[in-house]
């Protein structure tokens, strides 16, 4: 799964990396987050009219048609997107990029109740999770979820899932609403090779969503 991640880039950096059109009604600036947690508003990239735009969406997928106290999932399994009643419409018409510069996973430690968090980042910097979003309405804010896949061999040592990180060459295809072929879209959702990643243990401070700051991504001193 993906339950916490970092997004510390400024708006200008995201605009340059993802080709975003900065509009007057968009956010004027972004708060750097080293402990992005579910239910927070996060920046996402969507495509409309042939252009990429930045939107803010609550992390926890909740379409406007969902009523009551139904959960708002933060992750969606790649293997069931096309058949899930909750996700299939957004899989067809509501795909998005979720910018990030790293994420956390937790590993069980024999003999200990508390799991050990690890920080994972790409050697080539800023990247995008494959995501789905729903625009919401007056009563329901826009929301999003991050897609997960089986892990690569390195992350399999820590967890049985990992977020789907898109190759740059696949980002246009993922955002293009004209692409409707299920097999073609699912081919974008594969585990990123382990050699592209740097993985190391960090402080358990990140386990509390109330903690924030660059010290959370510092390698754990032994």
Image (cartoon, rainbow, N blue to C red):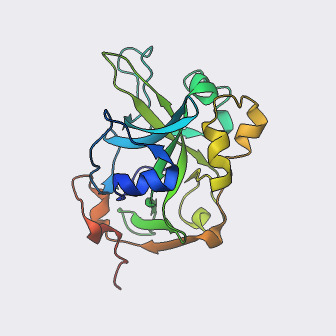
User: In this rendering, is residue 143 above or below 16?
Assistant: above
Q: Is residue 72 visible?
A: no
Of residues 45 and 186, which is closer to you in this image? 45
At horizontal 74% and vertical 32% (from top left) the residue drawn is: 182
Q: Position of residue 102 (x, y in %)?
A: 45, 61
Q: Quadrant of residue 100?
A: bottom left
Q: Position of residue 61 (x, y in %)?
A: 44, 31
Q: Quadrant of the C terminus?
A: bottom left
User: In this rendering, is residue 137 above or below 32?
Assistant: above
Of residues 120 and 17, which is closer to you in this image? 17
Query: Is 30 on the left-hand or right-hand side of 83?
Result: left
Query: Is 204 on the left-hand or right-hand side of 51?
Result: left
At horizontal 67% and vertical 25% (from top left) the residue drawn is: 83
At horizontal 32% and vertical 56% (from top left) the residue drawn is: 35
Q: Quadrant of residue 8?
A: bottom left
* Farthest-out residue, bottom: 222
Q: Position of residue 126 (x, y in %)?
A: 48, 61
* Farthest-out residue, left: 210
User: In this rendering, is residue 76 above or below 19?
Assistant: above
Q: How many marks?
A: 0
Q: Is residue 54 visible?
A: yes
Query: Is 184 on the left-hand or right-hand side of 12?
Result: right
At horizontal 54% and vertical 69% (from top left) the residue drawn is: 124
Q: Position of residue 200 (x, y in %)?
A: 46, 74
């Amino acid at each position: 799964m993906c339950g916490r991640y970092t997004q510390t880039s400024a708006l200008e950096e995201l605009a340059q990396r993802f080709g975003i059109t900065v509009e007057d009604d968009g956010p004027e600036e972004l708060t750097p987050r080293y402990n992005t947690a579910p239910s927070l508003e996060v920046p996402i990239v969507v495509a409309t009219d042939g252009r990429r735009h930045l939107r803010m969406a609550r992390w926890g997928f909740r379409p406007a048609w969902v009523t009551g106290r139904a959960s708002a999932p933060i992750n969606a399994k790649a293997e069931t997107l096309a058949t899930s009643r909750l996700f299939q419409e957004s899989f067809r018409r509501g795909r998005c990029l979720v910018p990030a510069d790293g994420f956390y996973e937790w590993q069980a430690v024999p003999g200990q109740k508390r799991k050990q968090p690890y920080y994972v980042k790409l050697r080539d910097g800023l990247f995008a999770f494959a995501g789905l979003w729903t625009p919401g309405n007056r009563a329901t804010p826009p929301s999003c979820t991050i897609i997960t896949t089986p892990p690569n061999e390195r992350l399999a040592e820590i967890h049985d899932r990992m977020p789907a990180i898109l190759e740059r060459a696949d980002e246009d295809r993922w955002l293009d609403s004209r692409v409707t072929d299920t097999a073609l879209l699912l081919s974008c959702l594969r585990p990123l090779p382990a050699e592209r990643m740097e993985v190391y243990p960090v402080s358990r401070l990140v386990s509390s969503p109330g903690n924030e700051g660059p010290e959370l991504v510092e390698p754990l001193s032994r």
